[in-house]
Amino acid sequence: MMLARKNDMAPPLPVTAAHGAPTPRLRPIPWGLIVVLSVIFLGFWQFPPLDMLKHSTSIFPLTLHTIEESFAVIVSILVFAISWHTYDRTRSGNISIIACGFLAVGLLDFAHMLSYRGMPDFVTPASPQKAIVFWLAARYVAAATLLIVALRPWTPFATPGTRYRLMAGSLALSALIYGLQLLTPEVWPVMFIPGEGLSGLKIAAEYGIIAILGLTAWLLYRQTQTPQTFDAANLFTATLITTLSELCFTLYSNVNDIFSLVGHTYKVIAYFCIYRAVFVASIREPYQRLAQEIDERQVAEARIQFLAYHDPVTTLPNRLLTRERFEAAREEAREHDGQVALAYLDLDNFKTINDSLGHSMGNQLLQAIGARLREQLAPQETIGRQGGDEFLVVLPVPAGRLAIEARLALILEQMQIPFAIGGHDLSTSVSIGVAVYPDDGQDFETLLRKADTAMYRAKAAGRNGHCFFDQDMVKDADARLRLRNDLRPALERGEFLLHYQPQIDLASGRVIGAEALIRWQHPELGMVPPGRFIGIAEETGLIVPISEWAIRTACRQAVEWQAAGARELVIAVNLSAVQFMRGDLVGTIASALAGSGLEPRHLELELTESILIQGEENILATVQRLHAIGVQMSIDDFGTGYSSLSYLKRFAVDKLKIDQSFVRDLASDPEDAAIVRAIIQMAHSLGLKTIAEGVETAEILALLRTMACDEAQGYHFARPLPAAEFSRYIQNAQAQPAGA
Ligand code: C2E
Ligand code: MG
Ligand code: MG
């Protein structure tokens, strides 16, 4: 079974922190509703064509009253229930005040409904007086509740248990009014005079309520103007609508008329606003916050989960996920007798790119490489980032090497297509080491180690290629580690030396120069060639002091040979890309020249194409300063990199050193011959000289002459020689020019 793919795309980071407390905010007042209700009220009050409705005594029958009051009672009890049950000690005590207030309002409205004219006996017979007593009591409690919450700050109760005392008070008040009305109704003043209608006291009582509500509305309106943690807008609206409702109750002449209907309806609407205020504040908003809180947490969790399994720069699977994918692929392979190749990819020139173009460009390159590799791979294959410029590829394949080779060839090919990044066309290549399950090991760590070892072999074999692990490599890796450790003391102990290889002018056959090639005389390992330690010296940065030593030594040696007769001898030294990034190359050259007394034109610096290809401004500036000193410059191993004519023009080098890989088979390979001929012609057209490296036979030398190559160097003339032997060599050569 393949492991389910973990999401490869990074989710966004959570935007805000989670929070529980209500946030203060402005809530809009529903002015539309207020205006509509006011217009309706004014219409019935002041619009003569509606007068007939005013005088109708059947427009608000008992059934409708009972329905509306039932609704009002239900809403009041809902207000109570919601406010009471969503209580928590950190929230405002006003919610509990509304709860207890509306508990009493609901109970009193219930009694009012049962006392309405036409209802059956409720302990005592129904009557307008009885209904009005309960009615006014309910209205006063509602108005007082709203006034208290408009006055009191929205803070929690200071003393615990306050809400229980409030509820007890609310129940006690309701019971008292019930008791007085049902048992001793005569204690109440007369509110309704049969045959006459409302008493003056009743109308005055309604105005009292209107006055309380007016004050409350004003207080609440002010609160709606600033952000609040509670729904001031709905409480304000409820207060205004209740006021309109009360106005209706000062105007009705008959409990079944239009004002009674409108007043009752407005009361229900007002209660509904209060219900909304407590519902929204107590349930909806906290719920929305919770749903939001949950969303953000899920995003954060997804992000953490993603980061646990992915590399943040490339978003590719990290080592952990790559390992899981490998293990899943291994199980699959085990069942089907297949194999799983673990390929360790290392970019060949990433350090130079990173050092010269900066980390941001380096990261962009890594991203682009990751993306391109991801595109190339099949769904069951995995590309992960191991770290730095190293990638891992898990390739489940059928038995045999062919399938692996085919996949690797594709990867190598893809990596050679330049990447367009930040206005640069960055060329890169990879070296790949491969270890295969089950042949090279069973577990991820073992295979990773072996693939890493094989990768170093691929690097040593000239980069831009792949190498399968084999057991002998373990010894090599140990040796490499040893060289790395021994390199620093080697410089202090003076274990480095230079050999010199003569360079011959083909027209005259004279020795015109010498290339200084470094060697390491290791006390136990013997003579170590540069190919084995230059890379390590570059990685560790030790190349800078080592090269400095080589440049000084070569300059002093050249001056010695010039003094001995070889007056025009040019000494060529090899430079590493790292020297352009670290240390003071120009200063080193200048001081080596000054210290030895060598004329600058007798020093030639061999640059590689990888140095120039970066095209960075500071490399150009360094090359220009070196030109200004007066030294010569050549491009080593020409033809193996990606140098273009534009680089040659831009850097104004003096000479191209045709790489020995083209020279070696010049006699037998027509393609190589064509390349060498083309390089020579191009160089000449640009006014550059050419030198062929690796000339091993007279036949090749003859061919180079026919191609009008300027100079040559190779075993045919001499191997790189210790200084003393080189001295003898030039003495002999002066007597009899080589190859003349
Ligand atoms: P390179 O600069 O291209 O040097 C030429 C290499 O080819 C030398 O290898 C030389 O010994 C070898 N060679 C010369 N003639 C022939 C021939 O006819 N046939 C064959 N097969 N090989 C020939 P060496 O000395 O092992 O140096 C290898 C590389 O190490 C050099 O390649 C150069 O890139 C680097 N290197 C050597 N010395 C230094 C140094 O002081 N500083 C730096 N940065 N690199 C150095
Ligand atoms: Mg060289
Ligand atoms: Mg070379």
Image (cartoon, rainbow, N blue to C red):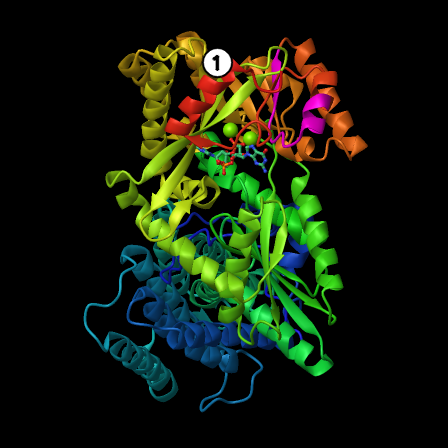
- Which residue: 59% across, 69% down? 326
Query: In x, y percent, where is residue 71?
Result: 56, 74
Query: In x, y percent, where is residue 416?
Result: 66, 40
Image height check: is 150 above or below 740?
below
Query: Magenta stretch?
Result: 688-702
Whether the magenta-drawn stretch holds residue 579 is answered as: no
- Which residue: 43% across, 67% down? 282
241 or 318, nearer to the observer: 318
Q: Quadrant of ligand 3?
A: top right
The residue positioned farthest toward the left in the image shown: 159
SS of the residue under disc 1: strand
Whether the magenta-drawn stretch holds residue 689 is answered as: yes
Rendered-image quadrant of the N terminus: bottom right
Q: Quadrant of residue 638?
A: top right
Residue picked out by circle 1: 632
699 or 422, nearer to the observer: 699
- Which residue: 40% across, 38% down? 519
Image height check: is 656 above or below 445?
above
499 or 121, nearer to the observer: 499
The residue positioned farthest toward the bottom in the image shown: 123
49 or 413, nearer to the observer: 413
Q: Can residue 10 be seen in this view?
A: no
Query: In x, y percent, where is residue 42?
Result: 57, 47
- Relative to 500, is 94 on the left or the right? left
